Amino acid sequence: MSDFPRMFRVRQHFSAERLDDVAGEVDRQLARLDLARRVKPGETVAITAGSRGVANIATILRAAVGHFRRLGAEPFLVPAIGSHGGGTAEGQLGVLASYGITEEAVGCPIRSSMETVVVGQTEEGLPVHFDRHAFEADHVVVCNRVKPHTRFAGPIESGLMKMMLIGLGKKNGAEIYHRAIVDYSFAQIIRSVVDKVFANCGILAGLAVIENAYDETARIEAVLPGDFETREVELLEIAKRSMARLPFDRVDLLLIDRIGKNISGTGLDTNVVGRKFDDHKAVEGETPRVKLIAIRGLTVETHGNAVGMGIAEFCKSSLLRDTDKAATRLNAITAEHVSAALAPLDYETDREILEAALPGDSEARIRSRLLWIADTLHLDEVECSEAYWEEAQGRNDLEILTELRGLPLGDDGDLP
């Protein structure tokens, strides 16, 4: 039971736009909106800070703070991260700090609270919750990355509008909206809630961020409230084209080093692993088609939130020991994705996982299609099994970095 496929490493070549002067672009984009006409000296501006691992996020927020200070305003940050951070104000500050977002780093106060204000009711009868600190500000600037959502498909997925209800709705709003999405639709609930937010919450502008396939800032665009929906639809299409993908569409076992909330809302990006609509298989027309997933650990930045582990079939036992059960369960229940917090089959070593997940027959095991990645956000280099060797040699978008060699299992049965 010790024969495993030989492996080789490839580097994927993605066409990737990249923004070199991130801070300068933030300032240029905000200046393009001529916000001085609406922002008076001494007025307060609440700027959202989310819980995803957005590239250069501290730089982006610091540049936005600087822009409003030059207008004579008093900017501050609010954590717009729903129920994350264990659903506490202190926990949410800790999440931001793990991304380098501190008062010292961004040059302004951070006002963290789970308290919300109900600013209206949707046509569906839903109370619209909004962060109290943001509501009491003279203006609100919504900053978020635009990208495909991990569970919902439509013209609007994850971006500025989602931040206005799930992020700024805090735990109270996130719970209500996620439940409502099951009965209605993601698009309907977003539009219903956002209409009330626009009418009552002083939204001044949005800062939309798009990243390239290498987890780098590709584009930043400042958007006026009246253009949020139209522009977000267009930016989402750009974001989809910019996403990194697995190098092959048929996979017997996908080995993932780490998952976490800084990687994706579901810990691992379901768009990458082909499980957006079903936790354990690709639906018709969806790629890639990954039979089994094994997770080896959690990111430091996820603070024990292991939501998403339930999308995998196998994991290291150490992952379960590192899991903050309360935070994981709270996040999964709030998001109406309880199965994402269920524990996979766990084993102490990587060798045990491989022996359980791959065929028992030695020859079939060696022919298995195995991919090994760091996480679903960093896919520029991937370890691939020998089953892909011939195809890889004919691919112009793949650079083969190594010869075929054995899996580097140590004497302790673990991979590096």
Image (spheres, grey):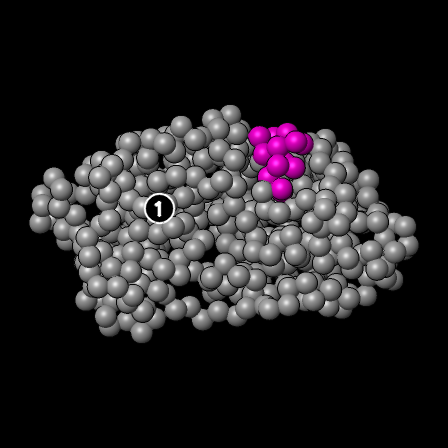
Q: Residue at x 72, y 58 (%)?
A: 63
Which of 321/137 is in front? 321
Q: Main secondary structure of the magenta part?
A: helix
Left or right side of 236 for 64 = right
The residue singled out by tag 1 in the image is 256
- Give percent across and percent down for residue 137: 82, 44
Residue 285 seen in render: no
Disc 1, SS = strand
Is 86 in the magenta? yes
Residue placed at 60% from the left, 69% from the top? 20
Q: Residue at x 51, y 25 (%)?
A: 326
Q: Is residue 266 above or below residue 40?
A: above
Identified by mark 1, the residue type is Ile
The quadrant holding residue 319 is top left
Residue at the extreme front of the image, as rendered: 411
Task: Please say if 103 is above or below 129.
Answer: below
> Where does the magenta region start and end?
85-97
Residue 217, quarter of picture: bottom right
Q: Looking at the picture, tell me which residue is in the foreground, 123 or 199.
A: 199
Query: Would residue 15 be counted in the magenta stretch?
Result: no
Q: Residue furthest top?
A: 326
